[in-house]
């Protein structure tokens, strides 16, 4: 396997979760201008749940998809522009067709880790339009490595040019990552990627394990700006890879400039590992649920940690946010 | 029609088909369309007086336009699994139902395996009722050879096929179909010949099928850009469909009952070479990106000595001419 590593920046997409999808035009513009000088392969923009996801259920976005994408595109010359697409939220004709016309280069089509077959038409459409299509398997800890491989092979067959597995709950131990990335990179013809969350403080080290196991694409967010406890901190990854003699073609000082800007202008409160993030990782629940769980728990007067544990028990996944209220009511009655 | 130009001798070799009734399952597929065109050409130019029956679930526009004002072709709209009686004077059957598009097998694995297994059983049961039956071709697949890395795969070479992998759905079902048809040959003396197709390129294919050469042509014509994810070293071979159709009819007439024949070209060519050839045909404005994201150097090319020696057939359209004719057709018909 070659030693090429592509760093993929999800700051302006996963970070949307951290501020309830309230990114402003000025923030996107300022960030895109800075990141474009760093040498980063691609940045992803949009609502935290991706294209077409702005809704009462998962949170309304301050800006339209069109404005987000066009603003980013207008400020990028070197770095590619990516979007996150979950079939169901995003449709081909209503959303993807327009997004491509606004200048998107990479479409990352995501499904729950056992539902790759929902991505066939979306991946096929992107390839037919000559753009890069990736397949993403979310909540990948919920499937065995063997099942993940089956689902990854499906996405590869549909035309995905890379397969990225997401530790959406931030619950992986290093060996979980090694086992899955090794199996996928040894059995797929396309590059394998890893997307970490930092609920257990392992986002950076798990990303390095993924690279050792054969991953060629690593997701990160500047300042770790992402859902829940955040993602692998991008500028730390860049520094580490430089120290480890990987050639990423990224200018460390410039990515540090971008990090300072994010700290000053994007983040309302520092991304940290909250008690709830730890509980959500142990429960194996999507990190993006944190804000909803906190709000609903307060409203119903129940312990948010109990809500997370019950969500994990019921194997609830992103898109099923309305279950949080059902669980809170159940817990309230029990108490 | 411009697609075929047979000599008197080539037509003479097929003379046994004169005044016969032939049934093709999968009649509206790529192979069905080309066989139909060749048989109609033989009727028109050499007075073969063949009566042709095409069985398929849907009458696609390509086959409809070929059949316009033809009294020598009858379309039977049916799922092959449900067809209870073939026209009683059929002498030859070519069982070409089922697409080799792996996306279908990934998304609908159980239904797909059922079509191959029970569709083939239905063909055999119907064949038992035919008094004038002379030969049945079961169109199998080069994929039944499993994981072989060779530029010289003969009919007796078998590699590993992991039946516990999702990638085994199509090849395993095709192996079952070969074994099943051979069981009918053994028990009921149905005159079955196995034909194992490899890769083709030519008119009437869809450029959106998940195969490298199709995608290269599509991307070169539409976007002037060919992306090769790996190192461009894997070697494949491509047969032009005029050769394909002529070979199948020759095997139908002269093939030994119980034998298996590879169907494909033995002229191996790397993916990088294919991309360069496409660029040379379309023009220097086409860009080729070799992304080097994997080290795959696999080879998958058939040995076709069996057909050459036993039936005296040859490849008459080489890869350069095949690409030239294909690109010419696709640029007029398919974009």
Image (cartoon, rainbow, N blue to C red):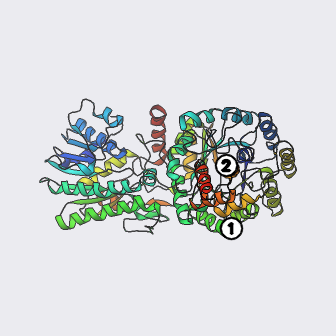
Q: Position of residue A1 (x, y in %)?
A: 65, 63
* Quadrant of the frame with the C terminus of chain A: bottom right
**Residue B286, quarter of picture:** top right
Q: Residues within 10 Å of mark 1 (few under 14, many from 20)?
A: few
Say which of marks 2 and 1 sits in front. Answer: 2
* Kind of element beneath mark 1: loop
- As measured in the structure, the alpha-carbon distance from the residue carrying label 2 to the one carrying label 1 is 30 Å
Mark 2, chain letter? Answer: A
Q: Looking at the image, tell me whether mark 2 or mark 1 is earlier in sequence order.
A: 1
**Residue A127, quarter of picture:** top right
A183 w.r.t. A80: above or below: below
Q: Position of residue A277 (x, y in %)?
A: 72, 58
Query: Which residue is more in the foreground, B107 or B329?
Result: B107
**Residue A208, quarter of picture:** bottom right
Q: Position of residue B118 (x, y in %)?
A: 28, 57
Residue A171: tell me if it is visible.
no
Q: Which residue was labeled with disc 1?
A: A173
Query: Which residue is more in the foreground, A333 or B131?
Result: A333
| Count of all numbered marks drawn on residues in the image | 2
Q: Residue at x 68, y 61 (%)?
A: A281
From the viewer's perspective, tell me whether residue B31 is left or right of residue B12.
right
For the residues beneath circles 2 and 1, the answer to whether they share a chain is yes
* Kind of element beneath mark 2: helix
Query: Which residue is more in the foreground, A193 or A25?
Result: A25
Q: Position of residue A199 (x, y in %)?
A: 73, 60
Q: Residue at x 28, y 54 (%)?
A: B119
B220 w.r.t. B262: above or below: above
Q: Residues within 10 Å of mark 2 (few under 14, many from 20)?
A: many
Q: Which residue was labeled with disc 2?
A: A296
């Amino acid at each position: 396997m070659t030693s090429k590593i592509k760093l993929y920046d999800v700051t302006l997409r996963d970070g949307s979760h951290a501020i309830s999808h309230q990114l402003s035009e000025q923030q996107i513009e300022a960030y895109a201008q800075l990141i474009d000088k760093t040498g980063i392969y691609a940045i992803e923009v949009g609502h935290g749940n991706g294209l077409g996801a702005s809704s009462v259920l998962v949170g309304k976005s301050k800006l339209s998809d069109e404005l987000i994408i066009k603003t980013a595109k207008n400020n990028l010359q070197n770095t590619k522009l990516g979007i996150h697409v979950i079939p169901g939220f995003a449709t081909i004709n209503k959303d993807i067709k327009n997004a491509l016309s606004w200048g998107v280069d990479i479409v990352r089509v995501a499904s729950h880790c056992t539902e790759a077959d929902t991505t066939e038409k979306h991946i096929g459409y992107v390839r037919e339009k000559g753009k890069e299509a990736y397949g993403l398997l979310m909540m990948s800890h919920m499937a065995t490595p063997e099942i993940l491989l089956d689902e990854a092979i499906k996405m590869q067959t549909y035309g995905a040019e890379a397969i990225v597995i997401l530790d959406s709950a931030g619950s992986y131990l290093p060996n979980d990552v090694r086992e899955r990335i090794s199996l996928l990179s040894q059995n797929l013809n396309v590059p394998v990627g890893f997307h970490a969350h930092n609920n257990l403080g392992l986002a950076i080290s798990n990303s390095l394990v993924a690279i050792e196991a054969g991953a060629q694409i690593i997701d990160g967010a500047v300042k770790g700006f992402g859902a829940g406890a955040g993602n692998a901190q991008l500028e730390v990854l860049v520094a580490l890879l430089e120290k480890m003699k990987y050639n990423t073609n990224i200018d460390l000082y410039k990515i540090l400039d971008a990090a300072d800007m994010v700290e000053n202008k994007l983040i309302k409160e520092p991304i940290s590992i909250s008690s709830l993030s730890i509980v959500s990782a142990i429960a194996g629940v999507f990190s993006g649920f944190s804000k909803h769980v906190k709000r609903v728990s307060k409203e119903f007067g129940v312990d948010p940690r109990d809500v997370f544990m019950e969500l994990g028990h019921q194997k609830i996944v992103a898109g099923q946010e309305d279950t949080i209220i059902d669980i809170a009511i159940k817990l309230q009655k029990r108490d | 029609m411009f697609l075929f130009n047979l000599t008197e001798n080539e037509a003479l070799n097929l003379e046994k088909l004169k005044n016969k009734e032939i049934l093709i399952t999968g009649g509206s597929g790529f192979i069905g369309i080309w066989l139909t065109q060749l048989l109609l050409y033989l009727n028109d130019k050499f007075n073969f007086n063949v009566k042709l029956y095409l069985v398929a679930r849907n009458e696609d526009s390509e086959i409809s336009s070929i059949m316009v004002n033809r009294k020598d072709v009858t379309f039977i709209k049916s799922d092959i699994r449900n067809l209870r009686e073939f026209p009683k004077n059929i002498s030859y059957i070519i069982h070409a139902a089922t697409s080799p598009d792996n996306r279908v097998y990934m998304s609908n694995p159980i239904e797909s395996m059922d079509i191959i297994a029970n569709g083939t059983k239905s063909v055999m049961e119907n064949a038992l009722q035919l008094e004038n039956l002379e030969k049945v071709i079961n169109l199998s697949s080069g994929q039944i050879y499993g994981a072989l890395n060779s530029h010289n795969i003969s009919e007796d070479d078998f590699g590993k096929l992991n039946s516990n992998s999702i990638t085994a759905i199509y090849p395993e079902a095709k192996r079952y179909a070969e074994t099943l048809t051979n069981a009918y040959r053994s028990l009921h003396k149905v005159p079955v010949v196995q034909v194992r197709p490899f890769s083709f390129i030519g008119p009437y294919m869809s450029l959106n099928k998940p195969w490298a050469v199709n995608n290269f042509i599509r991307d070169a014509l539409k976007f002037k850009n060919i992306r090769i994810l790996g190192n461009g070293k894997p070697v494949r071979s491509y047969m032009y469909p005029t050769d394909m159709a002529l070979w199948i009819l020759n095997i139908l007439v002269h093939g030994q009952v119980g034998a298996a024949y590879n169907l494909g070209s033995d002229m191996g060519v790397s993916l990088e070479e294919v991309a360069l050839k496409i660029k040379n045909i379309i023009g220097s404005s086409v860009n080729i990106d070799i992304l080097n994201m994997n080290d795959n150097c696999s080879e998958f090319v058939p040995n076709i000595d069996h057909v050459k020696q036993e039936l005296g057939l040859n490849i008459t359209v080489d890869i350069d001419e095949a690409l030239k004719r294909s690109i010419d057709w696709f640029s007029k018909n398919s974009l």
